[in-house]
Structures are given as structure tokens and as C-alpha cells.
Image (cartoon, grey):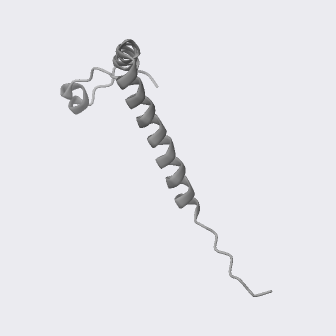
Amino acid sequence: MENKEIKIRPFFVKCAVIEAITVGLIVLTVLAISLFSKTHKKKMKNWYERYVLEDTSADEVISGEDTYEV
């Protein structure tokens, strides 16, 4: 047998590949839903606006006053 050097890929490369695959699947899923089903697209948009988006004004961020507890 020949002496072959085994190369081990760094951990961050594996993570980057997994993240790229995940993001690609999410984008393809959203694209497929938006192209094929308008009712699901509307439901998805309403869910996103209700649970993901948050109303924050610039004054709240700049003033530094916290109105929440950690």
C-alpha cells in the first residue's frame, strides 16, 4: 500500500456546507409555495408579519431606555 495522506476538512467548512444546503432548501421551498399556491403564500406572509417582524422605531434603539425585563 502506498502512504496516502488523509486530509480532514476543517469544522467550519462542514458547517458552511450544511448552512448553504439549509438556506437553499428554505429558499426553494418558499419559491415553490409562492409559485404554486397563492393561498399558502398569503398565510405564510401573515404568519411572518405576525411572529417574525417586530415594530421597532429608531428612537427606541437610540434612546437606550429599556422597557423590557430580562
Q: Please give the name of the residue rendered at 53% of the width and 60% of the height, measured from the top-left corner.
A: 13
The answer to whether any part of residue 52 appears in the image is no
**Up/down of 10 relative to 67, above or below:** below
Give 67 or 1, whichever is nearer the viewer.
1
Quadrant location of the N terminus in the rendered image: bottom right
**Up/down of 39 relative to 34, above or below:** above
Name the spot of residue 44 as percent of width and height, x first: 40, 18
Q: In the figure, is residue 10 to the left or right of 27?
A: right
Name the spot of residue 63 as percent of width and height, x first: 21, 29
Give 18 or 68, whichever is nearer the viewer.
18
Q: In the figure, is residue 7 to the left or right of 41?
A: right
Q: Residue furthest front?
A: 36
Q: Please give the name of the residue rendered at 39% of the width and 17% of the height, measured from the top-left corner.
A: 37
Q: Please give the name of the residue rendered at 37% of the width and 15% of the height, measured from the top-left corner.
A: 50
**Up/down of 14 relative to 21, above or below:** below
Q: Tell me which corner region of the image, top left, top right, bottom left or bottom right, holds residue 42.
A: top left
Q: In the figure, is residue 40 to the left or right of 56?
A: right
The answer to whether any part of residue 38 appears in the image is yes
**Up/down of 20 relative to 50, above or below:** below
Q: Residue furthest left?
A: 59
Name the spot of residue 17 as percent of width and height, x first: 52, 53
Q: In the figure, is residue 40 to the left or right of 13?
A: left
Q: Residue furthest bottom?
A: 2
Q: Tell me which corner region of the image, top left, top right, bottom left or bottom right, holds residue 41.
A: top left
Q: Please give the name of the residue rendered at 45% of the width and 31% of the height, measured from the top-left corner.
A: 29
| Total number of numbered discs in the rendering | 0
Name the spot of residue 14 as percent of width and height, x first: 57, 57
